[in-house]
Image (spheres, grey):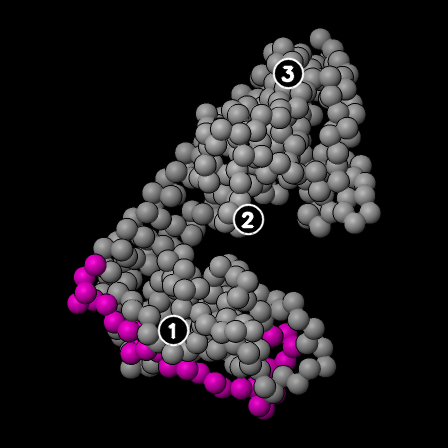
Amino acid sequence: MALTKYKLGDLLELSDKRNETLEYGINDVKGISIQKIFIETKADMTNVSLRPYYLVSPDDFAYVTVTSRNGEKITIAHNNTQNTYIVSSSYVVFRVNRQDILLSDFLFMYFNRPEFDRYARFNSWGSARETFSWDEMCDIDIDLPPIEIQQKYVDVYNAMLANQQSYERGLEDLKLVCDGYIDKLKKKQTLMRPLGLFIEKHECKNSDDKYGISQVKGISNKKEFGQTKADVQGKDLSKFLVIDPGMFAYNPRTDGRDMLVLALNREAESVLVTWNYNAFRIKPDCLQNLDPEYLYLLLCRSEFDRLVRFDSWGSSQELFSWDSLCDVNIPVPSIEVQKALLEINVSYIERKHINEHLKERIKNMCPILIKGSLEEAGV
């Protein structure tokens, strides 16, 4: 056996099928993440014609040519489903036209390596923005083992992927149980209460400068406290709000966002946030009726974020006011039921982290599998 060198362009062909008959609709529109998977599009599709959109048939690839400001990665994905997607006409769609020489799954393993990301970035060109063109893609020299060796390593990759996807399906079932039970609780009007009955605004400021720059936090779009991106060096921290353990903070400004930027301080120490945020806590005499973690679970739901956007008002900027938050109705079952739901949610979060770790491990296996196939063929 031996390796054979090819120009990648000799093994690929462009696909320019468009959605001219509107056979595919808004639910079929996809974007691509830097994790190299198809995702639901984040673009505003209001009044957008879907006729120019490219069809991505099963076994097709699609990629975004722009690589600047993209996390040093190229966004490319392989449609390994039986469904046809549609993507923006700014994407490039292609397929392998020599399956007797190159397996699509083997090529995707090749694309999944950090070496390929570095190659694409190095060979991207442009002034206002850098792009990795189709011509550059076709100019890649690739060493390929015989098809049977490719299949052997693809089988290993697909077996790992199948195990991870099976685990992920069980994960989503767990989330469905939690969400379904909360929805069931909401149908019981006797359990619905205005949030304002349980929470109170907390405006304790760092007036004595007890806390320093290391305690200043921002809030991420994952609804978690994290290192602030603001330059607070030399800033007067006496106006910053102190968020003690078990307390909440949120940014009332919602324009330009599809979610409320909110977090619960789960740490053992207090943190500081900008005075532009609102801070609140569950009233001490209500803690036996409402668990902070249960409230946080409710406030992290996409349903709540949609309500926030609907109830945000303003001219120069839209705000979700403190009064609006207090008017939100939430289901308040017994504290035992709340804790049972939290146990399910904790299990879901733990398994979600395991799933993300599995996906990362599989991705990290791609360079090893490609190298193994080349070494076996080179013997």
The tally of labels here is 3
The alpha-carbon separation of the residues under discs 2 and 3 comes to 31 Å
Disc 1 and disc 2 in contact, CB within 8 angstroms: no
- Residues shaded magenta: 187-216
The tag earlier along the polypeptide, 2 or 3, is: 2
Mark in front: 2 vs 3: 2
x, y (%) of residue 274? 57, 78
Residue 14, compared with residue 121, is above or below; it is above
Mark 2 residue type: Ala
Residue 97: mark in rendering: 3
Question: Quick check: 45 above or below 148?
Answer: below
**Residue assigned mark 2:** 43
Q: Position of 143 compared to 237: left or right?
A: right
**Residue at left offset 73%, top offset 17%:** 10
Between circles 1 and 2, the one closer to the viewer is 2
Q: Looking at the picture, does residue 224 appear above or below residue 36?
A: below
